Amino acid sequence: MKTYICKRIALVCVLLLCSSVVFADITYKVEKGDTLYSISRKYQITVAELRTANNLSENDIIKAGQKLIIPDADIGTAAALSSNNKSSNASSSAKTKTYVVAKGDTLYGIARKSGMSVADLMAINNLDSSSVIKVGQKLKINDVQVVSNTKSQTSSSKPGETVIKINDSLPDTRTYGATVFADSNTKWPVSSPKITQVKGKISGVQLSAKNNEVVSCIHEGTVMYVGVYRGFGQVVFVQSKTGLIYAYTGLGSVKVHKGEYAVSGCELGTAGLDSLSQKYQITFMVFQNGQPIDPAKAPRS
């Protein structure tokens, strides 16, 4: 009995440790041959997110032994940072105050301490993905208690050497709303889908699809990102001339490349098989300044 209790306690401790690793900020120690791109692929986030979390400019070069913060994956932030336009000032009823950038600060760290998303912080300060903050710079933040700057810690006994394995077999944590059939007058990336609202942090719609069905571009624009994004599988971001980011996620294959101009109706890829539901489908989202808008009301062309 005593052995059984000890095993149960040990199991609980392991589970708590694993959960803290998954949800805590981690650091990565740069190895010889690493690039920001290779590190971003390893952790399935965008290069822009990695730069922003570490206050790196596009011209900064990483070196072996350097420690980088690996931010949590957030597809809204990824969309905002993939934009080639400056964020317009966000309209918000929240009170703001001034924060003076201290040594070691990053946009990612300030956003976390201020209870904001990186996208919100960028928007209210009219910053873009190439912005690098400097000591003494004044930023608007939400009017909440901000703790003094501290370095992010990991649950590893050796900070800087934590490596997490991306687990695609996690339980489905998505929250679903009503399911409806597509209106024939509204164009969607796949034909005649069943549309299920996806709520919570992930805000968009899940669209049913046929086996390997073609996923079409519903609004012309520039392909800003192509790649695997943590929790979403293969992803394509298309930015319209008005700055909206159309996110097509869960693709089985991709037929476009970053930098291409995608015309309305062109093939972006094919629908993928969802690892949790075992059904062919995609998740479709539209973002403005990193904030989701109703995909049904987003402009088509």
Image (cartoon, rainbow, N blue to C red):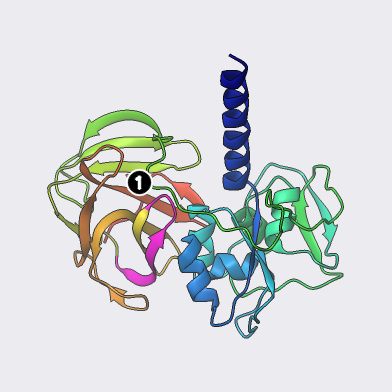
Q: Residue furthest top?
A: 1
- In the rendering, at what x and y percent does residue 117 appear? 63, 51
- Magenta highlight: main SS: strand
Residue 173 painted magenta: no
Which one is in front, 18 or 273? 18
- In the rendering, at what x and y percent does residue 11 appear? 57, 30
Displayed quadrant of residue 65? bottom right
Give the residue type that dot 1 points to. Lys
- Horizontal side of 39 relative to 116 (left or right) equals left
- Horizontal side of 234 relative to 190 (left or right) equals right
Residue beneath label 1, please? 297
Q: Is residue 12 visible?
A: yes
Q: Quadrant of the N terminus?
A: top right
Q: Quadrant of the C terminus?
A: bottom left
Q: Is residue 128 visible?
A: no
Secondary structure category for the residue under label 1: loop
Displayed quadrant of residue 9? top right
Residue at 85 percent of width and 65 percent of height? 102
Say how many tags the image has.
1
Which one is in front, 235 or 207? 235
30 shown above or below 211: below
Residue at 65 percent of width and 83 percent of height? 60
Residue 230 painted magenta: yes
- Horizontal side of 83 relative to 294 (left or right) equals right
- In the rendering, at what x and y percent does residue 246 appear? 37, 58
Neighbours of disc 1 within 10 Å: few (<14), some (14-19), many (20+): few
Residue at 23 percent of width and 66 percent of height? 264
- In the rendering, at what x and y percent does residue 257 appear? 31, 75
258 shown above or below 120: below
Q: Which residues are magenta?
A: 220-232
Residue at 29 percent of width and 62 percent of height? 219
